[in-house]
Image: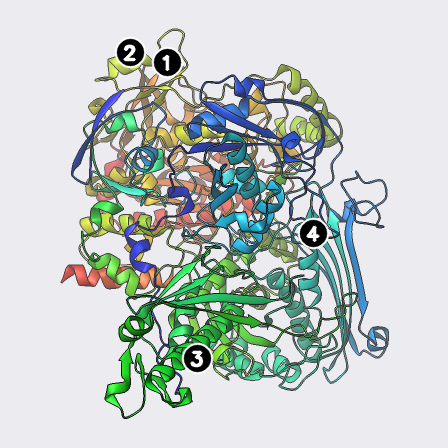
Amino acid sequence: MTVIGRAVGQSVRLREAPERVTGRAIYTHDLVLPGMLWGAILRSPHPHAVIRAIDVSPALAMAGVVATLTGEDTADRYLNYGPAFADRYPLARSRVRFVGEEVAAVAAETPALARAAAAAIRVEYEPLPAVFDPAVAVAPGAPQVLHGPKLPWNVAQHTTADWGGVAEGFAAAAHVVEGRFEHGLVAPVCLETNGVVASWDDAAGTMDIWAGTQAPFFARKEVAHLLGVPRERVRLRSVHIGGGFGGKSQSPEPIGICALLARKAGRPVKIVLTRREEFLGGKTDHGKVMHLRSAAAADGTLLARHTDYLVDNGAFTHMGPAYISAVRQRTANLYRVRAAGFDGRLVYTNKVPGGSYRGMGAPQIIWAIETQVDELAERLGKDPLRYRQEIANRPGDVTPQGFRISTCPLVECLEEAGRRIGWEEKRANPKPWRGVGIAAMINPSVGVLYPEGNFANVALTLRADGTFLLGTQAADCGTWQNTVLAQFAAEELDAAVERIDVLHMDTAEAPDDLGSAASRVTFVTGGAAIDAGRRMKAEVAARLAALWAVPAEALEFAGDAVGLPGDNARRLDWPGVAALLGPIRVEGHHVIDLPRADPKTGYGHYAATYGFGAQAAEVEVDPATGHVRVLKVVVVQDMGRVINPAALEGQMHGGIVQGIGMALSEELVLQDGMPVNTSLITYRVPRIFEATEIDCAFIEQPDATGPYGAKAGGEHSINPTVAAIANAVAHATGIRFRRIPITPHRLRDALRRKEARRLDLQPWRRPYNLEVAAVRRLYPAIVFPALKKLGASLQRERPRVTDFDHERPANLAAAIEALNRPGRRAKLIAGGTDLLVGIRQGIYGPDLVVDIAGLAELKGIAVGDDVVRIGAGTTLAEITEDPALHAALPALAEGMELVATQQIRNVATLAGDLCQEKRCWFFRAALPCYKFGGAACPCYAITGDNRHHSVMGAGRCAAPCIADAAPILVALDATVIATDGRRERRIPMERFYRWSGETVLAPGEVMLAVEVPRAGPAQAYEKYAQWRGDFPEASAAVRLRQVGGRLAEARISLGGVAPLPMRPKASEATLLRDGLSDEALRAAAEKVVRGALPLRDNAAKLDMVVAVTERALRRARERLQARPQGEDERGAQE
Amino acid sequence: MHISLQVNGTPHRLEVRGAETLAEVLRDRLGLTGTKIGCNAGECGACTVVLDGRAVCACLVPTPRMDGAAVRTIEGVTPAEGLSPLQQALVEHGAFQCGFCTPGVVMSLTALFDRVRLPSEHEIRVALQGNVCRCSGYVRLIEAAKAAALRLAR
């Protein structure tokens, strides 16, 4: 037996690193085949509708369109064909069941043409009632989506189990905790959207596919099924994959569609989903309503747990049954529980079908369980960490669901996590608004979830030059899988790891493997790689033994060579072996061969072994805004043996930061089943400022069942993160959340319910509020439906454009001429960060864009003695980088640093910030709202998710002003200078916006510059946004001036809370009357919400705007007081 | 319209459409697929290139404007053989996984290092705030950037 460690246990670098860091790696998006066409998919705009007719002739009439595909072309074949659950065609037939469902596809010569042609297809729909909430879907009378065999409408599957003694456990309990836990849809958000290239060889009858899929095995099976050809005629090819996380598991829908389209077109076709399509039609995690009950004896022993789940299946069944099985196995296996029961219903709704996302439900279930463990600890008067150690699983345990626990250092993991976070000290002496929380996890290595079993095969070839090629069908989506598999083979052969190349995905070069999912590659495919190494050795030894006439057993594989120990003549390096014996190919196999669990109850040993771990999180809560900052996460993970520390640490970091997103910010927001936050601004994945310190440790107790003792690892990191953060938030605030993510709005709402003091809104101060409040009351039942109907016939059309003319005028006069050219729909473009995005969203439809980015007349910053003049076309980066401007107008310079990202600030202009369209997600989703479609249309924010909308001053449109510069320039008393080419107009910033937030600029008018009076440095801008650079939830700009030691002027302007920047005059008056004491500042800040009329979800913005106002006032006061004596008069000399 | 555009020092003459973006031209017309498109809305940073010394999202640059301009892409900052010190640091620190965001990260940091000799961690974060990475958790990205900055400053 050789000593393990030549390759295993080493931080071998990512093999694909050089290609990826240089941009040379080829992903599906990058592929171009000769003669290739571009495909585009037409998707349903309705959550539920009958398809009356589809007319593809307008698309086919377009020059350059080669083929169209509808449900008629797809034969009578379902996707994901399998025994009981097949319910979806590759393209809709006769009915659509969710917004985004694929209805037709087009292949054309260019991507733009394909998109235009898909949009030209005419589909006649008859809308049907739809259902989105799983709890409603199972109630009587709900709209009918689908149902499983012998089940009521909308139930796809119903599984129950009582693994014995649940009722007795609850009857005997000293403490019972019970709770309903909920979360919506979370998306994997791979940076590379789903894409596929399909190429059909008609003569040979074969199909080649390059695609982002984690499992070529399943993709191949699907394509063969849809095409009606033998599996062997379909080949999945190797390509780099830009992230998986479950989002590319099995066979993503575009693969089958693209294959069908390519065969019909007779040419290769490429389909790449847009980011919006990825949210609409890429599978999300399943939403869940989880009802948990846990019972404990007086000494803390967990007597029973019962879990009752409604799992949102979406409109079709994909991963749902596997998901039910995955969530069921989490009922009572983490911690010692005596008895357990489960009731799980998989429920159809008119939403995007659920898929798998890292953890497969575990992060949310563990959050619910760990919340209850904390609650029990509190009831029992025990420390949460010590209590967890008391009830932790231990080696040799058999759980109520039949898991047989082998290696299990859970107690040690908890201990070490506590030590590293400073548990004792931080629990005993918590700092205000700080908290630490702990949570544990269990994950199978690995679950037997596939009908095919759980097997892996690899091919290992010794090539003529003495290198090896390891072929695997499992796809490396970025996990370093290929590196780790090479390490296994190298270790087994005692060969240099560099000697082993890995080819992943290619079904022609590697035998079947179920692919990368469920953390299975290291554990299962790794076993196959070791087996391949073993077989290679046996084959080489047998052949050399015959040649050298020595016993095969005498040959030793060591030091990157093979030979007879002590005999230099009979020792060959690998090139020598290859030269002597020629190429050798072997296959390695590995099967997780366990007795199947009872299919009905799930009772049984589920996996070969189980990994355990603990995470501790420390958070800081801003009570004023509800913002949670994760200060640190400690992860201590039982890994059996660590194969590649660097790779594993990467998995830990990535999973934890995804967990931070899941805990605090990520959720799809739907309006009538349509996701409206389909952008990376509004679907808030963690960015670099959300990245936290992560302390990572592994406990190694090699497990006999794993490859070199390893356990699985890919999903473990995300599993306890949500729970650890939620428990830390509870420690910091005393609040236990029943819904994730814990957004600042929800946290603020919860804190407000605990606070005795209330903000005094005095809505009657704005008489208009009476009218608005009355209309809002009538909105759901009367106004909204009526306007929706009216708008459907009377709405203003906005042309959707795919191309436009672009002109670069030489000077301003030419630009104004172009802008006003008769018969054209011209728009100005400078940074383009609003216009180009808006065109793609369908909110702008110019046929001419007039490029003013380079015009010298619009550029430049001139800091004069009294006035600062900033050209309208000055970029935000130029504003932040100008030292003179910083000194003269610190509020503006600092404020612009908080806008968007470096890339955006580098091109976005001051005028663009002021004139950008509203960011209301209903408007940006091109819903026919008041702003989009005109006065006949409703405002979706009154009834929809309005957390980001205006809390004051809103009438028919509730979209707030999110231009950061707007409140700043109002507070600084700036003037906008605009021209129509004939005369210049000076517009005070305070009058720059109409009540609705539109600018007062005439259609042919161009903003030239902004002039800002210098009034001393006692000015400040404070903003609360969910991530640094995000649009403000609330912002406040302040300017103070003293004359003769007395406050002579206080200007405050608010952003993010009303359709236009608001000046809270009552607050200003308070300051002028009461001065700048802390109390006066607080009082003035609280008065900014006078006259507010919040909507259902945005009351938190009131607190946020009060908080940022107070902060801005304090900072401005500091600056006022920091000024040397005698200088305070300067600003007053106007 | 016709434009003359320099990419990584190589001049190109192209006929472009008004709506065509720099990202599309680089990828589809010039075959420079190292520049990735992750969102086509300026929100993810995968298409970051350097224009006039500044990091910009190529998906938001109208190509007609590029007449007479010079742009640097990931292909232009990669040595003919081996890796640049920045690339080397990213590899050594295991700073990325799937790699789809990585060219954009390299270009954002290239622009930063060209302007700031030894950037602070805060400046590094500001420079990368527009680059979404879903795999790495950013931790080792920051470490690698700091190490590269040190190496380049020496």
Between circles 4 and 2, the one closer to the viewer is 4
Residue A839, image x, y percentages? 44, 26
Q: Which one is earlier in the sequence, the residue at label 4 or at label 2?
A: 4
Q: Which one is earlier in the sequence, the residue at label 1 or at label 3?
A: 3
Discs 4, 3 touching: Cβ within 8 Å: no
Label 2 and label 3: CA atoms lie apart by 86 Å
Label 4 and label 2: CA atoms lie apart by 68 Å
Q: Can you identify the residue that label 3 sits on?
A: A538
To which chain does the residue with label 4 belong? A
B113 with respect to A425 (left or right): left
Amino acid type, residue under disc 1 in the picture:
Gly
Q: Which one is earlier in the sequence, the residue at label 2 or at label 3?
A: 3
- Mark 2 surroundings: few (<14), some (14-19) or many (≥20) residues within 10 A: some
Give SS at disc 2. loop
Q: Can you identify the residue that label 4 sits on?
A: A82
Amino acid type, residue under disc 3 in the picture:
Ala
Residue A58, which numbered label?
Answer: none
Residue A716 lies in quadrant: bottom right
Quarter of the image where the C terminus of chain A is located: top left
Amino acid type, residue under disc 2 in the picture:
Gly
Q: Which one is earlier in the sequence, the residue at label 1 or at label 2?
A: 2
Quarter of the image where the N terminus of chain A is located: bottom left
Instruction: Give B18 or A123, whichever is nearer the viewer.
Output: A123
Give SS at disc 3. helix
Residue A981, which numbered label?
Answer: 2
Residues indicated by labels 4 and 2 sit on the same polypeptide chain: yes
Discs 2, 3 touching: Cβ within 8 Å: no
Q: Which one is earlier in the sequence, the residue at label 4 or at label 1?
A: 4
Label 4 and label 1: CA atoms lie apart by 61 Å
